[in-house]
Amino acid sequence: MKTHPSLSKADFDKLLGWLSPDQDDAGRKYLVIREGLVRYFRLKGCYESQSLVDETINRVAIKLKTLEDPPDLKPITYFYGFAKNIFFEFLAELKKSPVQFEPGFFRGLVTGTDDDRDKETRFLCLDDCMAKLKNGEAEMVLTYFTKDRSEKFEARRLLAKKLNITVGNLHIKIHRVKNVLRACVEKCLEKV
């Protein structure tokens, strides 16, 4: 996703002026919009919600700079229109990510050398890290990887339906849990 640099004071002042001619009212509206955008991205399962909010605000401010007359629609609507596009860009970037969730992930964590003691240590670390996951995340990860090949798509669709989220949000959740697991296993192995 292409990111834009931080706003200049002049751009930010123009944005606030668009929200309201009264400086205090503009500040309040800005905070309400910002908090709403944070909630929007969090509900979408984005782990980088703050940076996505910043990017949304930056893009709206840049767009306002190029318009002679700001649009007549409500500012909140304008912000959410940009947020929707930024969310789609975030998903596209996530799909391009070299880290994928496949059953080999667990095999990679618990295999390494041919030493049975080393494998046992890796299994113990993985078990310990899985036990530390919260709110059914361990069950979600295990269910996500139970099937292989063509069966996995249907299993993942059913899992997303059970969790009452989209398949895209399921991938995001799994990606986040995978990073936590990897860091935990690596930290555990360093202690051994």
Image (cartoon, rainbow, N blue to C red):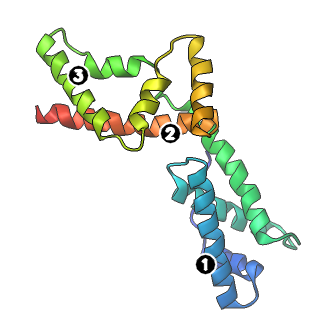
Disc sitting over residue 123 in the figure? 3
Horizontal side of 80 relative to 191 (left or right) equals right
- Image height check: is 162 above or below 105? below
Depth-wise, is mark 1 or mark 3 nearer the camera? 3
Distance between the alpha carbons at the discs numbered 1 and 3: 54 Å
Locate residue 108, reporting x and y percent: 32, 19
Disc sitting over residue 138 in the figure? none
Packing grade of label 2 (10 A; few <14, some 14-19, many >=20) is: some
Number of marks in the rendered image: 3
Q: In the structure shown, which secondary structural element does the residue marked by tag 1 occupy? A: helix
Q: Are marks 2 and 1 in contact (CB under 8 Å)?
A: no
Three-letter residue code for mark 1: Lys
Q: In the structure shown, which secondary structural element does the residue marked by tag 3 occupy? A: helix
Distance between the alpha carbons at the discs numbered 2 and 3: 23 Å
Locate residue 181, reporting x and y percent: 33, 35
Picture quadrant of residue 66: bottom right
Q: Are marks 1 and 3 in contact (CB under 8 Å)?
A: no
Locate residue 127, reporting x and y percent: 26, 28
Determine the residue positioned at 15% across, 34% down. Answer: 190
Determine the residue positioned at 69% across, 83% down. Answer: 26
Three-letter residue code for mark 3: Phe
Q: Residue tagged by mark 1? A: 9
Horizontal side of 85 relative to 172 (left or right) equals right
Disc sitting over residue 173 in the figure? 2
Three-letter residue code for mark 2: Lys
Task: Say whether disc 1 or disc 3 marks the residue closer to the N-terminus.
Answer: 1
- Image height check: is 36 above or below 151? below
Depth-wise, is mark 2 or mark 1 nearer the camera? 2
Packing grade of label 3 (10 A; few <14, some 14-19, many >=20) is: some
Determine the residue positioned at 23% across, 33% down. Answer: 128
Locate residue 130, reporting x and y percent: 31, 33
